[in-house]
């Protein structure tokens, strides 16, 4: 016998089951579009339709379904015949799993200090992946060959985690974008130092749309080894994929995905979403739209500053994707927030992040500019 309370199917005397949770107000006016994050947007209607269409009958679980087979072909179309795609639930999981599958336990990963894997994943690559992350300072969120060389320390020394991977975010957390040539130079540097190149492509579509190029031109063609390919930020309900490009790495992915809690039993619904986005042009049109809205916002704010209507604000990073970073005093931000939500950017003082999504409208952007001018 132990001292545990015996289990009972009956509620204890006096227990009441009349609690009713508050109803959610699902009217559109209760959920106005904002600039908090592209994650704040809902899912694209075509994605919802794809999920509904996949909701038919029975099909094998864990990726044995035809939607996942199609996704494999779709990804080969973008990234070449060697590409292998592994759908996962979220971007942090994709990053941890991608890096863990490609590296030994003593590895370190060089990345920008501002990178999501360094700053925004609660230490998951370290705690879950067992990898040390080395965050290098950058002016704009972008690594360069020189920054990488300077960060490769302690090679061969048993007292140091061994730098065996470089990870870049495309587009970066600062909204900047690497050109294909810049990635080629980074890949050559990494490979020359016996490191692999991982791309956190949470917003790879935004980068490809901004540069008016293909997904493969920014990855396969320029020496990238493995990608965390985004989806949720570009209109999916919730799905990302790891795409392994280098056939010499990632062999344990099948097992590690399960061990890392990223194996979906009803995988058809992840794959159907990714097919809706990447099976045609939706990834590009949605990303292009979000980028265009960010450019409209940046141009409008720059014009307001130049004409003296908003003299106290300044744009502090290049607008090369779907986000605008603006320096503004706290009291200005507080007043503007009476009309719109947006985030403080923790990596710089008095800087706010204004992020556009696939469903941001020109009217939303113009109203935000007006609210900031007014503030
Ligand atoms: C660059 C980047 N990578 C990865 C992620 C992780 O995505 P998730 O929130 O799905 O884990 C994010 C999310 O904001 C991100 O911005």
Image (cartoon, grey):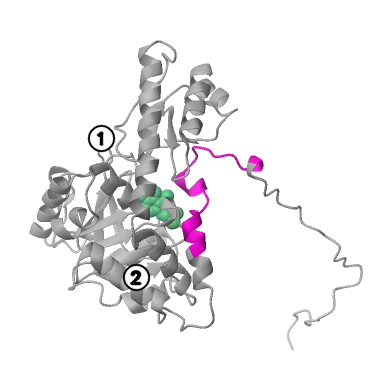
The reply to whether callout 2 and callout 1 are in contact (CB within 8 Å) is: no
**250 versus 311 height, above or below:** below
The residue that mark 2 highlights is: 71
In the picture as drawn, the residue positioned furthest to the left comes out as 192
User: At which x and y percent is residue 200?
Assistant: 31, 55
> Label 2 CB, ligand 1: below 8 Å?
no
Distance CA(mark 2)–CA(mark 1): 37 Å
**375 versus 112 height, above or below:** above
- Image quadrant holding the N terminus, namely bottom right
- Is residue 291 located in the magenta-colored stretch of the structure? no
Q: Which residues are magenta?
A: 29-49
User: At which x and y percent is residue 312?
Assistant: 42, 16
| Camera sees residue 28 | yes
Q: Secondary structure at mark 2?
A: helix
The residue that mark 1 highlights is: 139
Q: Secondary structure at mark 1?
A: loop
Nearer the observer: mark 2 or 1; the answer is 2
Q: Residues within 10 Å of mark 1 (few under 14, many from 20)?
A: few
Q: Earlier in the sequence, mark 2 or mark 1?
A: 2
| Camera sees residue 345 | no
Front one among 76 and 254: 76
**352 versus 84 height, above or below:** above
**140 versus 284 height, above or below:** above
């Amino acid at each position: 016998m132990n001292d545990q309370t015996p289990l009972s199917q009956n509620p204890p005397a006096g227990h009441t089951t009349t609690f009713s949770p508050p109803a959610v107000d699902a009217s559109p006016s209760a959920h106005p579009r904002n600039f908090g994050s592209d994650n704040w947007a809902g899912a694209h209607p075509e994605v919802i339709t794809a999920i509904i269409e996949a909701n038919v009958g029975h099909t094998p679980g864990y990726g044995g379904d035809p939607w996942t087979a199609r996704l494999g072909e779709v990804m080969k179309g973008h990234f070449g015949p060697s590409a292998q795609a592994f759908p996962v639930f979220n971007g942090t999981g994709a990053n941890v799993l991608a890096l863990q599958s490609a590296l030994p336990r003593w590895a370190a990963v060089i990345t920008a200090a501002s990178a999501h894997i360094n700053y925004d994943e609660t230490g998951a690559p370290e705690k879950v992946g067992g990898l040390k992350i080395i965050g290098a300072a950058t002016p704009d969120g972008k690594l360069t060959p020189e920054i990488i060389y300077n960060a490769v320390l302690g090679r061969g020394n048993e007292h140091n985690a061994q730098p065996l991977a470089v990870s870049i975010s495309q587009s970066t957390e600062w909204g900047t974008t690497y050109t294909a040539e810049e990635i080629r130079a980074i890949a050559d540097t990494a490979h020359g130092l016996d490191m692999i190149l991982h791309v956190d492509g949470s917003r790879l579509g935004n980068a490809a749309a901004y540069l008016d190029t293909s997904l493969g031109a920014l990855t396969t063609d320029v020496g990238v080894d493995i990608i965390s390919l985004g989806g949720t930020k570009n209109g999916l309900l919730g799905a990302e994929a790891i795409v392994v490009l280098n056939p010499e790495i990632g062999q344990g992915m099948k097992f590690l995905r399960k061990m890392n809690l990223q194996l979906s039993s009803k995988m058809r619904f992840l794959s159907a979403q990714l097919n809706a986005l990447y099976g045609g042009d939706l990834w590009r049109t949605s990303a292009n739209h979000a980028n265009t809205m960010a450019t409209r916002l940046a141009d409008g704010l720059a014009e307001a500053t130049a004409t003296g209507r908003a003299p106290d604000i300044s744009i502090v990073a290049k607008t090369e994707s779907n986000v605008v970073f603006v320096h503004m005093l706290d009291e200005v931000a507080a007043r503007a927030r009476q009309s719109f939500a947006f985030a403080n950017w923790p990596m710089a003082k008095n800087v706010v992040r204004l992020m556009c999504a696939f469903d941001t409208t020109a009217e939303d952007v113009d109203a935000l500019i007006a609210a900031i001018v007014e503030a």
